[in-house]
Image: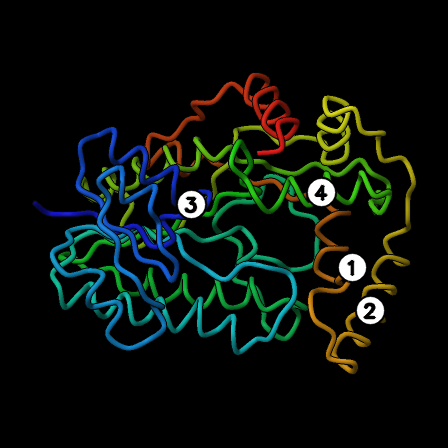
Amino acid sequence: MTKILVTGGGGFLGRAIVNRLLESGHGVRVVGRGAQPELEAAGVEFVRGDLAQPGVARRAVAGCDTVFHVAAKAGVWGDFVEFHRANVEATRLLLEAAREAGVSRFVYTSTPSVVFNGSALAGADESLPYVEPSKCPCAYPVTKAEAERLVLAANAPDFRTCALRPHLIWGVGDNHLVPRVVARARAGRLRIVGRGDNRVDMTHVDNAAHAHLLALDALSRGTACGRAYFLSDGAPVPLWGWINGLLGRLGVAPVTRRVPVWAAYAAATVAEGLWRILRREGEPPMTRFVAVELSKDHWFSIEAAMRDLGYAPVVDNERALAELADWLKSGR
């Protein structure tokens, strides 16, 4: 049976995509560096390996008709070489292997950060230019943009590709974004950066997974080939209002203390310098990229995804927020 490959299938978004594919009756294969016993128990085929190592991509795509390339090295701090290896080199090898194996559809999970320019983005669309490496203080957007370019440039009549840019994925099962914010708030180490009235897009994990399957169908119809699409829950939310609303559900005091943008950026610049000089492990308490992201509007038009993919959010945000709060309270 022809299988669909999901890289990063054991991760937050990847697992949601795998579950939807299984529910639809597809054969699924995942590739990753660590074992995935729960997925294998569900009938998912597992290939172990690092996609940036020669030969792993070929083993992963063998016999597959479609690839969802979800795996990536995310983060706001780290060595550029490591980000480039995981995000660019792995994507290049996977594209080459997929073409050689006769894969016909390739959906790439990108990020709105590929258009980061340090400015507020309100209602922006896909006409925005890619991030300029020399003006971006973070390796993640730069390497994701380079990888997205590779994916879209590879589009051909017999190898159809597209990229999806979900913004701030959240929901039950998230082990990175929201739990870290909550932990910092509990510890009294979270501050509102700037005026606190900035709005951002959020994308529930089920909405993001739904969009990936829609992209698969769109590629089959030939309506999304070689294009990138912003994704969200459909309406921006006040960032700090959303955070404080969740904290309230958890019985955590709201974040009220503020720091000016210039002060946060200056502190981040100093912290980054110290981390580099002293070669400290982990990431600084604040980075320039995060200071900008926390203080400015970042929301995007999803009209193109609605038009070409038939996308519309499928999640009731109020109910999903209640479910997330219950899950966080349970400590799972």
Residue 181 - label: 4
Report the mark closest to the observer, 3 or 1.
1
Q: Quadrant of residue 278?
A: bottom right
Q: CA distance from mark 3 to mark 4?
A: 27 Å
Cα–Cα span, label 1 and label 2: 7 Å
> What secondary structure is found at the residue carrying circle 2?
helix
Label drawn at residue 228: none
- x 41%, y 47%: residue: 164
Q: Earlier in the sequence, mark 3 or mark 1?
A: 3
Judged by depth in the image, the label closer to the viewer, 4 or 1, is 4
Q: Is 195 on the left-hand or right-hand side of 165?
A: right
| Mark 4–mark 1 CB contact (< 8 Å) | no
Query: Which residue type does callout 1 highlight?
Result: Met
* Rendered location of residue 102, percent (x, y): 11, 60
Residues 200 and 276: in front is 276
Residue 44 location in percent, x, y? 24, 44
Give the numbered dot on residue 229: 3
The disc, 2 or 4, on the residue closer to the chain's N-terminal end is 4
The CA distance from mark 3 to mark 1 is 29 Å
- Measuring 86% from the left and 41% from the top, which residue is drawn there? 195
Residue tagged 2: 271
Query: On the picture, is 299 further left or further right than 245?
Result: left
